[in-house]
Amino acid sequence: MDARPGRVERLRRLKSAMAECDLSALVCVRNLDVLLVSGFWPVIGNAVAIVTDEPKVFLVVPEEARELAERGWADRIETYRLGSLDRLEDTPRVLLALVESLLRPLADGLTRIGMEMGPVHLPAAYVSMNVYGAALRAELEHAFARTHLAPSDALLASMRMRPTPWERERIRDSCAMAGAAYRMGAAALRPQVPETNAVLPFRDAYAECATAHAQVARADSFFYCMSGSNAASAWAAFQQSRMTRLAAGVTVLVHCNAYADGYWTDLTRTYVLGAPGEELRRMFDAIARARDAALAAIRPGVRACDVDKAARDVLAAAGYGAAFKHPLGHGVGFTAIDHNEPPRIHPASHQLLEEDMVFNVEPGIYIDGFGGARDCNVVGVTGDGVELLSPFQQSPQEWCIPLS
Amino acid sequence: MDARPGRVERLRRLKSAMAECDLSALVCVRNLDVLLVSGFWPVIGNAVAIVTDEPKVFLVVPEEARELAERGWADRIETYRLGSLDRLEDTPRVLLALVESLLRPLADGLTRIGMEMGPVHLPAAYVSMNVYGAALRAELEHAFARTHLAPSDALLASMRMRPTPWERERIRDSCAMAGAAYRMGAAALRPQVPETNAVLPFRDAYAECATAHAQVARADSFFYCMSGSNAASAWAAFQQSRMTRLAAGVTVLVHCNAYADGYWTDLTRTYVLGAPGEELRRMFDAIARARDAALAAIRPGVRACDVDKAARDVLAAAGYGAAFKHPLGHGVGFTAIDHNEPPRIHPASHQLLEEDMVFNVEPGIYIDGFGGARDCNVVGVTGDGVELLSPFQQSPQEWCIPLS
């Protein structure tokens, strides 16, 4: 994948956002923000991106990440060696020294440096990842005593909220691979399989699709399955597959977060094995109609709360008002799943939708002791409406898996 | 799993470590440290563990994590709701208020509170996770202005370095499940399969083993495959499966980090499909002998550098001195993979081994353009020697997969 096509528009936006916040430089260490500004998604977290106000993008990455970093659009890539056989090294110190040496020549012009300060939800890019705590900030404060360090969290979140067309294409890609995985995984669902095993065909299919996609270097997925009464808990802050065995006639909720080179999707489909009973049929129908109402409401200039309301009203009219226990959506793309990521499609959010915003639309019904169903799609706001980025298995008929 | 058997010894050690550092309380937010002190492994990161010097352990967790938290040994569990439909909430604020309310009654006795401050490698416990940056520290500094906040990083790392017998049993469990996965995955290896797909049978097998293990609530694994000349890069800071197809006669290195309820293993086996050539046979033989020499050197009182040397000397004598590009090992168990986690089995480390220490032993040979082979096991130091926690596929004969 040549990431450079993504460069021009992203740098244009960076320049204008930095000017607006009066920043002479921006320093990013969080994986989702490094991706945003440089097109490179750090693997284990110990990379730093520096943006100057020209703008130029510098990356400091471990030597072995050079090849991946070159897929992005940094103007300059400095590498460092992680570890030595001669000394017991403290990794961040090497890295911080390099960052300082890159910023130093700019020091005269540096009046305000933006950096991440607040809490954040980091997506899992690898089996484990480095976080700095307050170390980087302390180091920069020490090295650039005359420069004001300003929190850049809001600026970065606001840029993540509106992926460029090129970035949206990447998100669409991961939705498409996940769609193929859902089709294959759903066909393999059958009674008696534990939830923890039911997700494996979905996950394998995603990996196989990514392998076949010549332009994707790194891809993985997290699928969670919650069935029967477990699915009634799927509104919570996290999903959990358990040893519970699937059964015919109950809701089988399958949630997915998957990435291709750092661009994420956030999806859910809910199935039933065999013919659904009357109550389930009503739930599925209400959810599909709530989704359609929300999609019909999305266009630039509309308030986020009104999109939430469009779906919520349908569910309430169907008798499921109290059972829809969470907001309708949140920003998706650079984050895997973070309910606080803007734009928040939330009953209390008066934020106006803008072209390019990407978020999920996830009407759900959760009934204790009975089950839960959710249909979660990713959408992008267009000039005059909405693009559904996950156009697969949209009809309740497709949610019913025949018992063979 | 009743985690309480793990409680007594862990609390005894916590009490003595806190006394040694003169701490009247300890506040932990990082997933590996919360697990260490409470037996509960946070899912998405927004949990806080507070240890008083009695010691008592308090947990603050999202409402929906109560069931998981109860599997640990906290004396008191406070829950909070993540998110609201009425207000756009800022999660950490709710959480921090609760933490403050728990610490407040102790305020008179609080002279020094220990908290995590330095950089750390966090294992992936879920698809994404919350990190606080400097937010928690700022909040506590503000709320307890007369209390000294002391960095607890070294104290916690030192405790993680020596799992209790109960914790070691958990690590042994995840090694055993990974061992079964390696046997099944290796049997499925065949030429022409891309590396990214070759790992799928390993990963599925681990999940299936965990499903069958009645006492494991959460389990997952990360397998990476690097074959042929890609395997020559497997000494780097991270592993990466690529679209490269496996071939007969070349090294097929399979790396694994897997967890069961937060306790991790770190393993590698290297295979060849069909009969190995002369060079590969020599490499496999040297690696097995280097491993045996290291294991034979491990016992309490021995310097870490001497264990590294035992393996390094064997490889050097076989002509592979320069090809063994990294230290012999590092702490494993609470961390997935972190080369800085003590005890570091490193040429420059004079640290003395102690009973209960758990670390990996990973002799490797990496030859550019040819391939790479590594044998990574997890071991525990016993009263007079070593326990191999991953006793599977130890002989080079088992690394040769017949072509069917």
Image: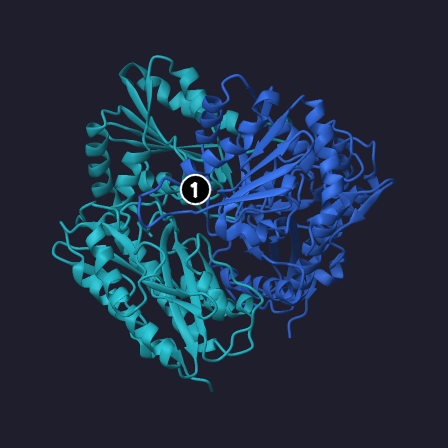
Chain colours: A cyan, B blue
Horizontal arrangement in the rendering, residue B55 relative to residue A305 (left or right):
right
How many labels were placed on the picture? 1
**Crowd rating for badge 1 (residues with CA inside 10 Å; few <14, some 14–19, many 20+):** many
A67 up-or-down from A220: above or below? above
Mark 1: amino acid: Pro
Q: Where is residue A319 drawn, in percent x and y?
A: 30, 68
For residue A226, side relative to residue B350 (left or right): left
Taking the view exactly as shown, the residue that stands out farthest to the front is: B105
The reply, left or right, for residue A265 in relation to residue A201 is left
Residue visible at 29% across and 35% down?
Answer: A154
Residue at the spot x=29%, y=71% of the render? A286
Residue closer to the observer: A162 or A72: A162
Q: Where is A184 relative to B256, above or below?
A: below
- Near-viewer residue (B87 or A268): B87
Nearest the viewer among B284 and A217 is A217
Residue visible at 48% across and 36% down?
B98
Residue extending farthest to the bottom is A404
Residue tagged 1: A42
Q: Residue at x 65, y 67 (%)?
A: B212
Regarding residue A165, the answer to whether it shows in the image is: yes
Apparent side of residue A280 relative to residue B340 in the rendered image (left or right): left
